[in-house]
Each structure stands twice: as C-alpha cells, then as structure tokens.
Image (tube, helix red, strand yellow):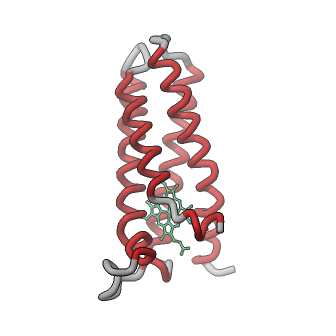
Amino acid sequence: MNLYQILQNFHSGWAYLTLLMGVLFVLMIGYFAFSKKARTAGITKLSFFATLTFHIQLLVGVVLYFVSPYAQFTENTMKDATNRLYAIEHPLMMFAAVVLITIANAKLKKSESVPMSSFILGLIALVLVLSRIPWSTWLG
Ligand code: HEM
C-alpha cells in the first residue's frame, strides 16, 4: 500500500465516524437547545469529539487532495461533474462544514445553556457534508 492508498482508505473509513458524530451532534445539541437544558459535561464532550472527528477528516483530506488523481485540474474540470466535485466542491464545502462545527463548539463552550446557534450551525454543517459526499464512489 502506498501513501495515497493509506490516506484514501483512512479518509473513506473515517467518513463513517464523521457522519455518525455529525448526526449525533445535531440530534443531541438540538434536543438540549429546544428543551432549554443546561450544558452538561457529557454534551460538552460530545461536541468536542464531534469537532475533533471533523478536524481529523479535514487534515487527512487536505493531504489526500495533493496526491489524489481525482483532485486534478484540467481544462475540463468545470465541465466534468465528477472532476469538479473532487477538485472544488467537496473540499470547499467540507472545509466550510468544519469551520461551522468549530464555531458551534466554541459557542457551546462559552455558554451555560446549549445555544440554538450551535444547533443551527451544526445542522448547516451536516447538510453541507451530506450534499457533497461522493456517494456513488464511496458506497457504490
Ligand atoms: C470533513 C468532512 C469530509 C468528509 C465527511 C469527507 C468524506 C469523503 C468521502 C466519503 C470520500 C469518498 C471516499 C471513497 O470513495 O472511498 C472522500 C473523498 C475525497 N475527499 Fe473527502 N471528506 C471530507 C473532507 C475533505 C476535505 C476537507 C478535503 C480536501 C481539502 C477532502 C478531499 C477528498 C479527496 C481528494 C477525495 C478523493 C479521494 C480519492 O479517492 O482519490 N475531503 N471524502
């Protein structure tokens, strides 16, 4: 296995955990925010680990970006939907999602309750992730 294959396998497998943590984040933060519950140690940890999971996926994704044959730019990149997804849309949207969940986590840490803004930011992050996963190559 070369570096590319190791990174690709990791990024592909870690994506399950990223999705799971993203869904848990939205469900639990949403539950706490809507029922106006005080922030507990448990929810703070969940938020931290969800953010950490996203950050690890981002770091590996950035390295993968430079070695993947799918993330190459050609004169057809904008015309070819698959090439455009890997070279532009996936990295940009995933990066935005990581920024959003990081802000959601920071807002949660600073607040005594669980803020609605953390839920909304987390929800947008999850929607961005779901919208730009290359589903057919990942699970196909
Ligand atoms: C943080 C959320 C992210 C998630 C959930 C995610 C998820 C995925 C998934 C499921 C695949 C398909 C893997 C497969 O076909 O087996 C993939 C591929 C890829 N991702 Fe991400 N990704 C994320 C972030 C990023 C970022 C930030 C970058 C780059 C800056 C990136 C770059 C890539 C590249 C280049 C591929 C294609 C790899 C290849 O097969 O050559 N990803 N990603």
Up-down: is 83 above or below 126? below
User: Which quadrant holds the N terminus?
Assistant: bottom right
The residue that appears at 41% across and 50% down in the rendered structure is: 128
Instruction: State whether residue 10 is above or below residue 23.
Output: below
Counting from the top left corner in percent of width and height, residue 14 is at 62, 56
- As drawn, is 104 to the left or to the right of 64? left
Residue 134: give x, y in percent of width and height.
Answer: 52, 65
Where residue 109 sits, quadrant-wise, is top left
Which residue: 37% across, 65% down? Answer: 89
Position of 103 relative to 66 (above/below): above
Q: Nearer the viewer, residue 40 or 34?
A: 34
Q: Taking 63 as reference, is 5 left or right?
A: right
Q: Position of residue 80 (x, y in %)?
A: 39, 80
Residue drawn at x 39%, y 29% as measured from the top left: 118
Q: Quadrant of residue 139 in the image? A: bottom right
Q: Quadrant of residue 121?
A: top left
| The one of 72 and 84 positioned closer to us in this rendering | 84
Q: Give the image location of residue 56, x and y in percent.
A: 52, 53
Q: Quadrant of the C terminus?
A: bottom right
Residue most extreme to the right: 1
- Does 116 appear above or below 47? above
